[in-house]
Image (spheres, grey):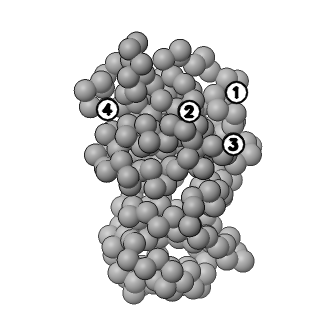
Amino acid sequence: MQTKDSFAYAFRDGIEALTSLVPGSYHTTAPNGTLLALTYSVIPALNPIVVPQADPDSDEVATLAGLAARKAGPVPWSVRLRGEPGERLREIAARHGRTTATSQPFMTATVDGARAVDASVRQIKGDEFRTFATVVAGVFGAPPELVSAVYTAEVLDSPQVAAFLAETPRGEPVAAGVAVITGEYAGLANIGTLPAFRGQGHARKVTEALLSSGAKHFYLHADEQTTGFFERFGFATAENWTMLTP
């Protein structure tokens, strides 16, 4: 039986796997399992201290926060942990300017058997990393170069990464999504459709493709607007995580 702990550690492993693939990145795991992962993106969530334990090791977080302050340079980093941070963790984060707390539903699902993948969705590799970046950037209102700095050609060519595009009948890419796979687990991210093409089922088709990417257990961080969408695929909110950012 999969537990909240097993999904939490899978999330940590997924962040570590992605970071290890990004050129020029840095990561280290403390003895009790807390991870510092720096992709050097300008997105704080991609430069996290991930605390997978239900009972965080405050000393490890303090050590890794000091290391992040030295290693990250000008890029923003975050602390991501299960539930609400206690007073000690808030003090550690505040010491480094991480005072904004954002709650995120952590959703999980177990899928038995592959789902049918619509013909309009296809998996892509590194030679299309710029196309993938353009679509994701258009979905989330970010510069394409910000996306391509993380989802590089090397990253998309990795067997641990499954990236998909949905296209119109004319071959125009309009939706995207990605999975980072570690064994039987996969973390889903960046699922969405370009504004002009929403409401036509493209994100649903991408999600179905991601759920057929070879893993059995899936997890993702959602928000109030997207939890209902993912519940249609069997996801349920296992717990809330907190992200502490500048």
Q: CA distance from mark 2 to mark 4?
A: 18 Å
Q: Are marks 2 and 3 in contact (CB under 8 Å)?
A: no
Q: Please report whichever mark, 2 or 4, sits nearer to the chain's N-terminal start.
A: 2
- The span from disc 4 to disc 3 (Cα, nearest Å) is 26 Å
Query: Alpha-carbon distance for marks 1 and 2?
Result: 24 Å
- Residue 49 visible? The answer is yes
Q: Please report whichever mark, 2 or 3, sits nearer to the chain's N-terminal start.
A: 2
Q: Between marks 2 and 3, how big is the CA–CA gap?
A: 12 Å
Q: Determine which residue is flagged by label 2.
A: 124
Secondary structure of residue under mark 3: loop
- In the image, is residue 190 above or below residue 4? above
Q: Residue at x 57, y 85 (%)?
A: 63
Q: Is residue 173 above or below residue 200?
A: below
* Whether label 4 touches label 3, CB < 8 Å: no
Q: Amino acid at mark 4?
A: Leu
Q: Give whichever of 127, 214 is nearer the camera.
A: 127
Question: Which residue is label 4 attached to?
Answer: 194
